[in-house]
Amino acid sequence: MNTRFVSTLVAFAVLWGCAAEQPQLVTEPGVSLTGYRELEVAPVINDTGQTVDSNFIDTFAADLKAALRSKGYDIIDAKPAATDTLVVICTFLKNSPGGGVLNPEVSLQTTLLDKRSNKTLGAILTTVEGQSALGGVLFPDPAGWCAGYDCLLGRVANQIAAEIDRKIKGP
C-alpha cells in the first residue's frame, strides 16, 4: 500500500471522526471496482493489542459474508485466482465491548485487494460507538437503534457490505 494512499485514509478518518454514519470507501486514483462479482473474505485480523476471549471475530466474519451474499456476491475460499476476485481484509483496530458505564466502541479498517495482482484498490475506516443504557448497550443506526454487541457487529458488517456494493455497482 503506498504512503500517499495511507495518508489520505488517515486524513479522511480524522475529518470524519467517530461518526456513526455510513463509512465511505476510498479508492486509489483511477481505480474502478466495477466487474468484481467474486469476493474472498480473508481471515479477520485482531490488531487491538488485546487478547480477547470473545468470539467477536468469528461473529463479524460470518455477518460480513452473509451481508455480501445478500447483495448477490459469490464468496469464495482462498485459492489461486482464476477470475477477477476482490479480497476483503478486515482489521479490528479497537474493540471495546463496553458494559456498565463504559461506552462500547469498534474501529475497523477494511482493505480491498485485487487477488491476481495483490494490488490495494481501496480502504474503508469504520468507527462506531454505542451508548450504555439501562444495563445494556444501544447503538445508533440509520435503520433505528440496535441493542447488544453482536447486533453492533452485524450493523458494521452491513455498512461495509453496502459500501463495497455501492462502489462495485455504482449509484
Image: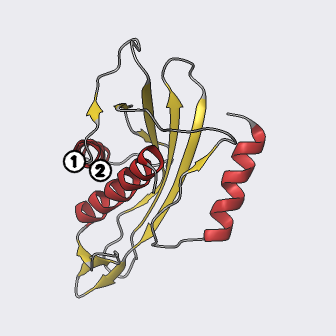
The quadrant the N terminus occupies is top right
| In contact (CB < 8 Å): disc 2 and disc 1 | no
Q: Type of residue at label 1?
A: Ser
- Residue 163 figure quarter: bottom left
Please give the label number shown on residue 70. Answer: 1
Cα separation, mark 2 vs mark 1, equals: 21 Å
The quadrant the C terminus occupies is bottom left
Residue that sits furthest to the right in the current view: 4
Please give the label number shown on residue 88. Answer: none
Picture coordinates of residue 156 (x, y %)?
Answer: 36, 59
> Nearer the N terminus, badge 2 or badge 1?
2
Picture coordinates of residue 8 (x, y %)?
Answer: 72, 52
Q: Depth-wise, is mark 2 or mark 1 nearer the camera?
A: 1
Q: Which residue is mark 2?
A: 56
Picture coordinates of residue 101 (x, y %)?
Answer: 36, 82
Residue that sits furthest to the bottom in the current view: 134
Q: Secondary structure at mark 1?
A: helix
Count residues near mark 1 (Cα–Cα under 10 Å), then give few for <14, some for 14-19, many for 20+: few
Q: Nearer the viewer, residue 124 or 169?
A: 169
Q: Nearer the viewer, residue 39 or 90?
A: 39
Residue at 25% in and 74% down: 146
Count residues near mark 2 (Cα–Cα under 10 Å), then give few for <14, some for 14-19, many for 20+: some
Residue at 51% in and 17% down: 116
Residue at 27% in and 41% down: 65
Q: Secondary structure at mark 2?
A: helix
- Residue 96 figure quarter: bottom left
* Number of marks present in the image shown: 2
Q: Is residue 23 above or below residue 67?
A: below
Q: Type of residue at label 2?
A: Phe
